[in-house]
Image (tube, rainbow, N blue to C red):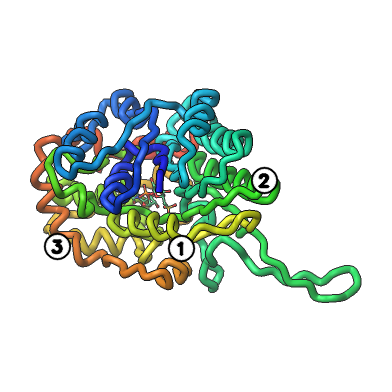
Amino acid sequence: MKIAVMGGDGFIGWPTSLHLSDAGHEIHIIDNLSRRWIDTELGVQSLTPMDSIQERTRIWHAETGRRIHFHLIDLAKDYEILKQWLAEERPDAIIHFAEQRAAPYSMKSDRHKNYTVDNNVNATHNLLNALVEIDLDAHVVHLGTMGVYGYSTVGAAIPEGYLPVDITANSGEKVSQEILYPSNPGSIYHMTKCLDQLLFAFYAKNDGLRITDLHQGIVWGTHTEQTRRHAQLINRFDYDGDYGTVLNRFLIQAAIGYPLTVHGVGGQTRAFIHIQDSVRCIELALNNPPARNSRVEIFNQMTETHRVRDLAKMISEMAGVEIAWLPNPRKEAAENDLIVKNDKFLALGLNPITLKEGLLEEIVEIGKKYAYRVDRKRVPAVSAWTKDIAKTINRDP
Ligand code: USQ
């Protein structure tokens, strides 16, 4: 297949591009390199030394003989250029990662809220709009988030996208239907993914676009089979308070002897998936497109759930590092249970990597190896969800 990977320079976009190129597909990365600009804005860098996208693709070609093409296009701003590129290249599938993906960054200030909404909503809408305009029947695979559901389970597992509801009609007759699971975002970033869902539902219904939305949990790990092949193919790794996600943050904190930054009592239960499984799931979704004029296909892309304090205790015991119980900068439930259905990927053959398998290796191979690149001042999470929380949090562990 000819595949366009929108946001192919990012944390999941890059290993996905390599994985699919390795599988023999023709890969075109489209990216505005915004993630690299945000590093500059925040004064942080990836824990792992990351080369330019041009250098990365040069190394991939030298190692494998395969070409990955790069095009500098901003989905949210360059609508005409995007439309022209799609019209000329006519890819078979489009993977859409081209969104600002950090909840804390989206809550930093009014400017960051505006940026996240403008960027994410326009990127998604421009893409769908262009596909209709040029009459291109490419399968769109979007990376969504488990966060569209909220994180509370009322005793029943969260289904894959659609909720069956029974309604009593005026006639007294019982009517069953499936509705999009009610969205319940916990940040501006998560809110944009909820808005994406409505855009997808509309374009699937109105124009028959073929769309798959992957509701992914928190990704952990760094390497995939392909990123290990050469030092310059390494994936990025975020450890800072805005972009670092909880488990990867704990791993690097363990490696540098920094007390593990648990928010509140750590009662938040979240869904997790390893980066290697994430790219496998994307490939499975690509190989199983929905039919034209059908509803949006939704998968829950996660493999296990864990409570934040249990993860902290596990890593603390493994690495001998203390736990710091910090005031929570976020507005979220202090404790929640979470049960999630992920039957669809399991049925397609996903054999998940479990947390225990790779944790220690990450601490040693990635954490300790690159510990010299860590700026300890960038570890605390400083973005507060409300002005009141900002006044009250003490950020030092
Ligand atoms: N947390 C801590 N300590 C930390 C960092 C986070 O206790 O040092 C807590 C947070 O308060 C939160 C939980 O860990 O309760 C998860 O935070 P996170 O930063 O790992 O994840 P989140 O902000 O939800 O976002 C990440 C990705 C996002 C993706 C989402 C999937 O950045 O792109 O969509 O995970 S999900 O969480 O399932 O919605």
191 or 393: which is nearer to us? 191
What residue type is disc 2 on?
Answer: Asp
Residue 235 falls left or right of residue 329: left
When asked about the image quadrant of residue 357, the answer is: bottom left
Residue 397 falls left or right of residue 381: left
What residue type is disc 1 on?
Answer: Asn
- Disc with the residue nearer the chain's start (2 vs 1): 2
**One can see residue 307 in this view:** yes
What residue type is disc 3 on?
Answer: Met
- Disc with the residue nearer the chain's start (1 vs 3): 3
Please report the residue visible at 56 percent of the width from the left and 60 percent of the height from the top: 161
Q: Give the image location of residue 13, x and y in percent.
A: 34, 43
The tally of labels here is 3
**Residue that numbered label 2 is attached to:** 207
Q: Give the image location of residue 183, x and y in percent.
A: 59, 53
Q: CA distance from mark 3 to mark 2?
A: 53 Å
